Image (cartoon, coloured by chain):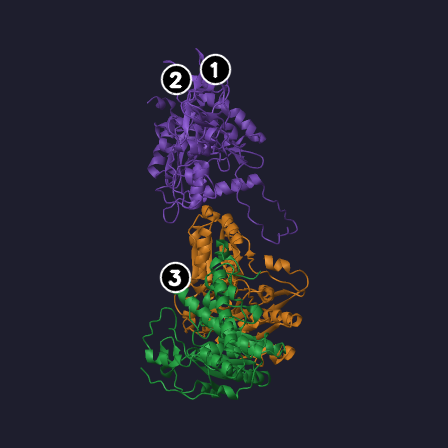
Amino acid sequence: MTQATQHVVQAARDITYAAAIREAMSEEMRQDPRVFLLGEDVGVYGGAFGVSVGMIEEFGPERVRDTPISEAAIVGMATGAALTGFRPIAEIQFSDFLVLALDQLGNQAAKMRYMFGGKARVPMVVRAPEGSGTGAAAQHCQSQEAIYCHFPGLKVVVPSTPYDAKGLLKASIRDDNPVVFLEQKLLYRKTGPVPDQDYLVPLGRADVKRKGKDLTIVTWGRMVPMCLEVAGALEKDGIEVEIVDPRTLVPLDRDTIIESVCKTGRLAIVHEAVQTAGYGGEIAALVADSKAFFHLDAPIRRVAGYDVPIPYNPKLEKAAVPTPERIERAVRDLLA
Amino acid sequence: MATAVIMPKAGMSMESGTVVRWLKKVGDPVKVGEPLLEITTDKVDMEVEAETSGHLLCILKDQGEQVPVTQPIGYIGTSAELGKSVAELQGSSVGGAAGAPTAPAAEAASKPAVGEAAAAAGAQRVPSTPAARRRAGELGIDLAQVNPTGPNGEVKLRDVTSAAAENRVRMSPLARRVAEREGRSLSGVSGSGPGGRILLADLAPPPPPPAIPEVAPASPQPVAAPGETRTPVSGKRKVIAERLSRSMFTAPHYYLRVSVEVDHLLAARDGIGATGRKPSLNAFLMKYAAEAIKRHPALNTSWEGDAIVSRPAIDIGLAVAQADGLITPVVRDCGSKGVLAIDAELQPLVERALAGKLLPAEYSGATFTISNLGSFGIDEFTAIINPPGSAILAVGAIRNEPVIDPAGAVVVRNRMRLTLSCDHRVLDGAVGARFLRFLADVLEDPSRLLL
Amino acid sequence: MTEFAMRKLSPAPESVGVLPREQLERMYLQMLQTRAFEEKVAYFFSRGMIHGTTHLYIGEEATAIGAIAALDPDDLITSTHRGHGHTIAKGMDLNAMMAELFGRRDGACKGKGGSMHIADLSKGNLGANGVVGGGIPIAVGAALSIQMAKQSRVVVCFFGDGAINEGSFHESVNVASIWKLPVIFVCENNQYGMSMSVRRSTNLENLADRAKAYGIPGRRVDGNDVLAVHHAVREAKAYAKTNGPSLVVAETYRYQGHSKSDANKYRTKEEIAEWRTKDPIPRFRKYLSETGVFTDPELDAIEAKAKEQIEEAVRFGSESPEPDLDTLLTDVYSD
């Protein structure tokens, strides 16, 4: 039983990842009138992925606000509103489009507190779905979390389960900093247990999704269920893989990762995003420069997206990002 | 850099001295010329003076210990070196005689969190993983001596652990002999001797008989049908099953048969018995087998994957049937014992075997095994090789049989059938055949041993 | 070099309603403070005591002071990289402001923002901005806050003739127009986006015509006429509270280069000289004197006061200590 599910005692129900996100937003909007949602098609349409279905009926068009197709304005307005007392949630329809708002997100929201000598607070959440697998190809499918990890002042969250998604989003909304909340397209329809009672998942705390002694996999997002699947298969050969899901990339829970590698002596990092300059490199470097270095009995290996845009053809699309076979091969190589 | 304090050679004929008492404690500052300790030799009591200034870092030999001259008995160094392990001091010291592997300090890539690791490992040119280097440092193992099995030719943690278990680690000669002979595992053994040396006292009590890895029971447990009984497999049964299966299925067995006339053997036995105790038939067989093995040493070898190991001593095991199993007590070094000595050793072993009281040292390590089912009325049979041996001799019952003598007449003689099982990985057909023929010949005519 | 034509701009001072004396005094003082401040900055910069870069507002004082004089203290502004005039007009403490330019601990942003990122949230100044057009979406967001909180404040969004061609301008004005947000877009057309003349960058003679594209009112004013600017923004404020956004284009000119590294290769000395005849400060002084609101000695006294306050600010700023090194890592995140 994972640490996450251990929290889920008796009263829980299985809901989808998308529903969990909707619940988080709705619950926060009910209890704090400063929270509101804006973005393209979030109101009447219910969101491109159905995440905000029903919300405009409950909260009205002012607080579930449809915008024109203006990513810079969406994020910039969220910044201005956050600066002046509100707690907006800006939805960007595909994470690929977030770069259209990168000035407002990275040059403005991220830096204001620092630039203004600690006198500004920008409590906002920018939500966007990441990831390939829908056939929408190069400009709708990239995972670009590394970009946002590179702006001090932003926090970056990537949930992998409905439980984590709801708890982390609520915590993100309550956080006084700009948080980039990267959802996983292919996980929207996946269900998982979510407690009835109110709960938060704190930012900056990793979750050991599976305990093991032979090798540590650090992974996040859609790759978490894929790695769990691989770990289940490897168990039959007596290989026990430990899976650490950081859940928050910035700020990162280094201690949990380092302790795990000290225990197992082997580390593989699996992420869907492109390998070069991906966040896996950051984790590999910090592990290599920690006490875990002296416990490493194999090189640190990344299993990540190839350095290509996401192709259209379905077979190519699948092959462009990690597969269970590639992950298994990496694990076995490291155990050789 | 630490300097060794040695047992000084204080006289031309002095070979060793005994420490009487130290005049300084570990950590005390020491000045050149200051008295450090008192020693005594067979001729004289004297003080030993410090040859360098610094701090007394450690004491290797204490009150009452006798030390050969020029051996290190302590170390002096800087206060920064206080707290270093003896392995480190020995590695980096000047002066002082043997004993320590002089492992050059490895470059520390970054501040080592595990303090001694980088310094003691000696990992400069040997590709190895960080974990391997750290462990090697902890155990005082020179990485260059370790057999690497990593996929890129690097030393892995498991290799260091194996090396530690395989006598690469420092042990007292007695501990080494005992461990080797008894096949003791050294994993997890830490030495209490100087520099982490393993002493006999450190060797764990003899391990229990090898157990096969527990296989998770298939669930649900099958229930006995009416009339059936299910007996869970006991530890002993499991061991027998596992060892013999392994032997049967990994060693390619072939079988050689001879029929031997044993009248002369029986007469020799009676003859020796007339002067005292009559040795058992098995003791005779063991003696003859040992003599045959001396002349055909290939029979005293083992297959170990990448090498064939040949043993000097001929340790012969005799298969003994117990109530619930089978065990092979071993008589060591049969080649240098007479049949009476063998028998004298054998009898109590067999008694203890039947009572289930054999120690592992007494039933493991046979290089050749004899299994005799003659007393069960079996004419001949094929036996399964008992590892680590490469052959086993199956002995059948002695029967009166009609044979054709040289003159062409039909006569009745005592005959016994022998079947030799050989491991073809080690013993080719001709090798086994030559041995068995020789054995048969000397059984029939012992005087042939004089040849 | 393009032809520069004198244009007849919006109402002469006589037609503007009379403002209270204290307000006029404050406006004149602030214009003088701005001019003196900027001249000091130029001086210290050329001597290497203020570092980085800075964008001087010399010649444009009437726009900032005029516009902000039309606001209430709880109205908000967003500023630009050329924001010292806005900052002074919105009431930032001059000492803290100069200390910030010196990069000192007692600066308004603890020495960590500098000229282009200077802000004072307590005075409704949502900050200067190092990105052209960067403040426009933020201003609209602030206006959204006001609307959602059902308050009757307004936001004045300052930007230039360069920013009017940034995508952020268009997205922001469009959203403000559809939601009728209480924001006044004030375009300070100083005729150049760095070296790019507005004639070459934009296919419009009158930038205020951009407003038509978004269905909002637009007007053009003489940006060097402080009362004209004040009047326009006052009307825009009244409009904003009831109808939403509008665009005010203030025609003005900067006498100095774009920044301190500007060699003025893109314009003529004649052009600069021509605009100096329309310097807003002597122009306002003339108005105040001729209408009898202030005597010359009074006006001299105001000038002297401004100079003295700036001298004091320089003293304060240059004596303020450097920030501690450990403040490097502070205030990245809110706790």
Q: Mark 2 points at which residue?
A: B9
Chain B: what color? Answer: purple
Name the disc covering residue C234, or none: none
Between circles 2 and 1, the one closer to the viewer is: 2
**Res. C212 visible in picture:** yes
Residue C334 screen position, x and y as percent: 56, 62
**For the residue labelled by badge 3, is the local secondary structure a helix, a strand or a loop?**
loop
Chain letter tied to orange: A
Residue B264 screen position, x and y as percent: 41, 23
Q: Mark 1 points at which residue?
A: B275
Pointer 1 indicates a residue of which chain? B
Name the disc covering residue C48, or none: 3
Chain letter tied to green: C
Marks 1 and 3, how far apart at CA: 119 Å
Q: Which residue is drawn at 55% across and 48% down?
A: B215
Pointer 3 indicates a residue of which chain? C
**For the residue labelled by badge 1, is the local secondary structure a helix, a strand or a loop?**
loop
**Res. C137 visible in picture:** no
Instruction: Name the kind of residue labelled 2 in the image.
Output: Lys
Pointer 2 indicates a residue of which chain? B
